[in-house]
Amino acid sequence: MDISAESLGDSVHIDDTIDAIELYYAAGWTDGLPIVPPTRAKVQAMVERSGRAAHEVIAELPPQGGKATVERIATNAVMAGCLPEYMPVILTALEAMLETRFNLRGVLCSTHVSTPLLILNGPIVQALQVNSGHNVFGPGWRANATIGRAVQLTLVNIGGATPGVLDKATFGHPGKYTYCMAENEAANPWEPLHVERGLQPNDSTVTVYPAEAPHNINNHGSHNARDLLTVVADCMAILGGNHMYLGGECLLVFSPEHAATIAASGWRKQDVRAFLYERARQPLRLLRVGGMYGTDTQRNLWPRWIDHDDPEFLVPPVRRAEDISIVVAGGAGKHSVFLPGWGSRSVTRKIHAY
């Protein structure tokens, strides 16, 4: 069989599938897991489904500015185990990450643990069978596993974000293998994320967000919005988190049960944000103990209204209530998750091929 090799565009002939996999290991083109050998026919099918020319440059991907052509991205998508119909999602996600507000170079090269998370909304979720329910961040669904993996392989193999070389994450987290989910719109008592951001309910979209691993919020006892969100607020204002010093956008994923409890109290998303913005705070005296506190925090990163002379002044983890993004996902169980970010912001884009 002929597989893509060397520049992820040239071809070599290899007779055995295992030998092909071993070639990719030897070249450093895997994420540590076996890959699907990218045969010429499989790559061509990916390119055709994208609706774009094979040699069209989608982006010059940081940190090294690698030229991400449709064909090269398709090669990584095959390696990840994707179906051809996943290609429009992958291309749109990569284009979204290039927006300045996302700061892809910073996310990829930081010592922080964050990595791009993909959130899908709209009809594409059912069309591609993207999981939005039980085990939404876990294994078991091809679309979630392979779409996220294709993006990560592309960032390494084309962008040059090689772990331990230009990717300087002190720890990283399992989302660097794959990090892709869908919003559970059927269980959402509010507007879904893409509609809230000005798109139509029938639009298929992907949101990219630079996320840490999910932080579980266990609350089986609260039966009203105020009590439940008091617990959530405590989980958001952690002294060792980036947000207490850098601001930026953070993400909450409410389980359907928690979302139902909040909505039953008559609270809208804006009510949730307003409450959390006022409640999720830490006094300045504690923030000065360590974390990322320093001259930059004092002068540039916090809002001007922070009183640096008052040790009891309460500092929020975001600059504005609107910087708390909310989606609903997951299955049964009174758990939700908080996903702190890197300090930059998410981007939502319509997937035009769906």
Image (cartoon, grey):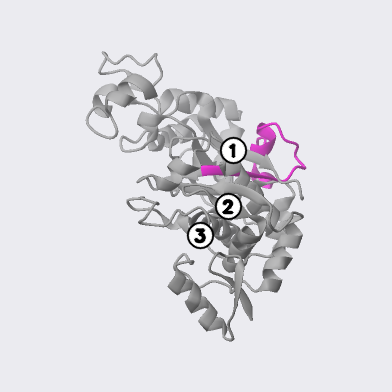
Residue type beneath disc 3: Asn
Residue 347 circle label: 1
Which residue is labeled 2 in the image?
67
Q: Nearer the viewer, residue 194 or 228?
A: 194
Q: Is residue 171 magenta?
A: no
To which quarter of the image does residue 238 belong?
top left
Residue 199 circle label: none
Locate residue 320 relative to residue 89 in the image: left or right. Answer: left
To which quarter of the image does residue 74 belong?
bottom right
In primary-sequence order, the first of circles 1 and 3 is 3
Which residue is labeled 3 in the image?
157
> For the magenta stretch, what is the residue range?
185-209
Whether 155 is drawn above or below 223: the answer is below
Observer-side mark, 1 or 3, equals: 3
Identify the residue shown where x is 45% and y is 53%. Answer: 161
How packed mark 2 is, by other alpha carbons closer than 10 Å (few <14, some 14-19, many 20 or more), is some
Residue type beneath disc 2: Lys
Whether 112 is drawn above or below 39: the answer is above
